[in-house]
Amino acid sequence: MGIARSTYYHGRVKRVDEAHLLAAIMAICDEFEAYGWRRVRAALQYQGICANHKRIKRLMREHSLQPRRRRRYVTTTDSDHDLPIFPDLAKHVALTGADQLWVADVTYVAIASGFAYVAIILDAWSRRVVGYAIGRSMDARLAIAALETAIASRQPSPGLIHHSERGSQYAAASYRALLAANGISGSMSRRGKSLR
């Protein structure tokens, strides 16, 4: 036909003025501070505002509306304490069955309002979770709740080795007392060595 492709779209797409587009972008970025230009563009399209991605990127850059990056790493081990440390018994164990060696660790899960901490106890032979607890604080109570769950579900015989990192949760007097009361031997990895 000899006419430009843009002729078809002329009049169908309504061009938004810069002030209106900027106000819409700022409203989206205020509500969702982790949104980058792709998500902002999708939110604008949902509102019926059509804008070029280069224009959106430029406006976000010029008005400092870049997404705020969340910190992805949270320290879960406090090994700088004066509490007693168990020797590493796990490195000499040859496993032949379940409930001979349990491995414990604390990790975190990012949620909308911050972090939730998860204390987990695995059976090293079967690699199954034998106990866990979820909480908002990462203290000895969380680790104790996971250990109590594991003991209640498995009823281990005396001689079981419980291996963990050198965190203050596992070195606390109440945690050590629970291990001793159930005939479980404590074991801890050396400083700076991960359990994974």
Image (cartoon, rainbow, N blue to C red):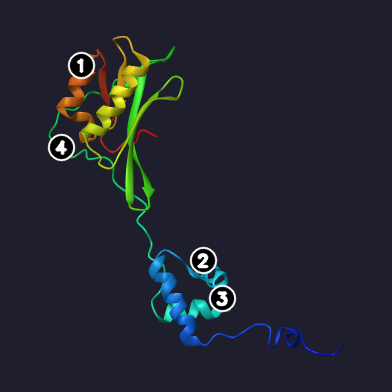
Of mark 1 and mark 2, the one earlier in the sequence is: 2
Residue nearest the viewer, comparing 6 with 186: 6
Q: Are marks 4 and 1 in contact (CB under 8 Å)?
A: no
Which is more foreground, mark 1 or mark 2? 2
What residue did someone put label 4 on? 81
Closer to viewer: mark 4 or mark 1 = 1
- The kind of secondary structure element at disc 3 is helix
Q: Amino acid at mark 1?
A: Ala
Q: Residue at x 43, y 80 (%)?
A: 23
SS category of the residue bearing label 4: loop
Q: What whole-number distance in Å separates the C-alpha atoms at marks 2 and 3?
A: 11 Å
Considering depth in this image, is 44 or 143 the residue closer to the camera? 44
Q: Secondary structure at mark 2?
A: helix
Residue 159 lies in what quarter of the image?
Answer: top left
Indicate whether 129 appears above or below 38: above
Kindly state the secondary structure of the residue where label 1 is placed: helix
Q: Quadrant of residue 188?
A: top left
Tag on residue 180? 1
The one of 189 and 54 positioned closer to us in this rendering: 54
- Of mark 4 and mark 1, the one earlier in the sequence is 4
| Residue of label 3 | 53
| Mark pair 1, 3: CA separation | 63 Å
**Looking at the picture, does residue 195 appear above or below residue 36?**
above
Q: Quadrant of residue 181?
A: top left
Q: Residues within 10 Å of mark 4 (few under 14, many from 20)?
A: few
Regarding residue 109, the answer to whether it shows in the image is yes
Quadrant including the N terminus: bottom right
Q: Which mark is residue 39?
A: 2
Amino acid identity at mark 2: Arg
